[in-house]
Image (tube, grey):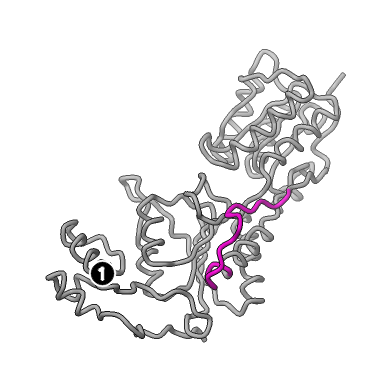
Amino acid sequence: MVRTASASVAAGPTLAVVAREAGVSVPTASKVVNGREDVAPETRRRVTEALDRLGYVRRPRFDATKAPRLVDLVVHSLESSWSGAVLHGVEEAAHDAGLEVVVSAALTRTRAGRPERGWLDKLVARGSSGVLFNLAELSDSQYAWLEQHRIPFVMIDPVQEPPEGVASVGAANWQGGLTATEHLLSLGHERIAVIAGHRRTMCSSARVAGHRSALASAGVRHRAEYVRHAGFDEGQARRRMLELLDLPEPPTAVFVCSDRMALGVYEALAERGLRVPDDVSVVGFDDLPEARWASPALTTVRQPLSEMAATALRSLLRLMDGHHPESTRTELSTRLVERASTGAPRA
């Protein structure tokens, strides 16, 4: 059973006092406190100034004896094995901590391209004590809203670099890219392509940077035409691989920055009558179940998704208890898992 936090504050003005000070109704003052957007800017300014002037506490900090043992996990999608691994890690760590977890795939966007805010209002209504964001891209206003309402949160594998002071947990993506390419180099490959995700995401950029570093250390020339972006989409990866195969000097190996995209690469190679790894070696990234099911089984870089999620929840618990970490960025190590999709290039 989820316990509810006390609705009263031991000291300080009531919302009615704040509303009277700002010259607005209590419902309007409540909207400002709860981060609702349907308030005129000037009205919001008056209420906010009254809140600060009177010392109104919008939300008490976490108290293990009073606050609800409830946290939110906001994921990008619930349809992938990636999300399943993250959910598994959070679930186990939450069970050990005696927490309840609410899971939602709520970071959708409006037609105007802006993130929806409905989950923010629901967060307050539920009385959640903290939030884990997986693969999330928050706006400046959403970060500000979370800070204003004193809601602790941790990012799991954030899409972009979070603002200073925001806690995040990820994998050693640069090292993973380096390891994948070093493996292909050790087999004798020099014509090594990379199919990356989105150009602007942290993880994709780091993996490509690690790949390029491995080439440079081995004295192998980096070829701009060997770098393609497929947005972590299987269909796009298939098309990018077909483009690579159409080059005058196609690659003999490809490092693909996700296992799902690697499946698209397999499909492209099969279309051209090419075999893995006899004609082209393939290395993926993630070590999702799909990597083991592929034929041949996919050599890939394992990132510890469940461990990342569990680490993030433990970091969130420390924030909820009022403890701030010495370092806001935590990176867990990656490792190469060798299977049957890589081999020496043809003579």
Q: Is residue 153 above or below residue 183?
A: below
Residue found 19% across the figure and 76% down from its top: 26
Residue 71 on the magenta segment: no
Q: Residues within 10 Å of mark 1 (few under 14, many from 20)?
A: many
Residue found 85% across the figure and 22% down from its top: 346
Q: Position of residue 299 (x, y in %)?
A: 78, 42
Mark 1 residue type? Leu
Pick whichever, 124 or 88, lies toward us: 124
Residue at the spot of label 1: 51
Pick whichever, 293 or 74, lies toward us: 74
Q: Quadrant of the C terminus?
A: top right
Q: Secondary structure at mark 1?
A: helix
Q: How many marks?
A: 1
Q: Specify whether 56 is left or right of 153.
A: left
In the figure, residue 301 lies in which quadrant?
Answer: top right
Pick whichever, 232 or 293, lies toward us: 232
Q: Which residues are magenta?
A: 318-333
Residue found 55% across the figure and 56% down from its top: 167
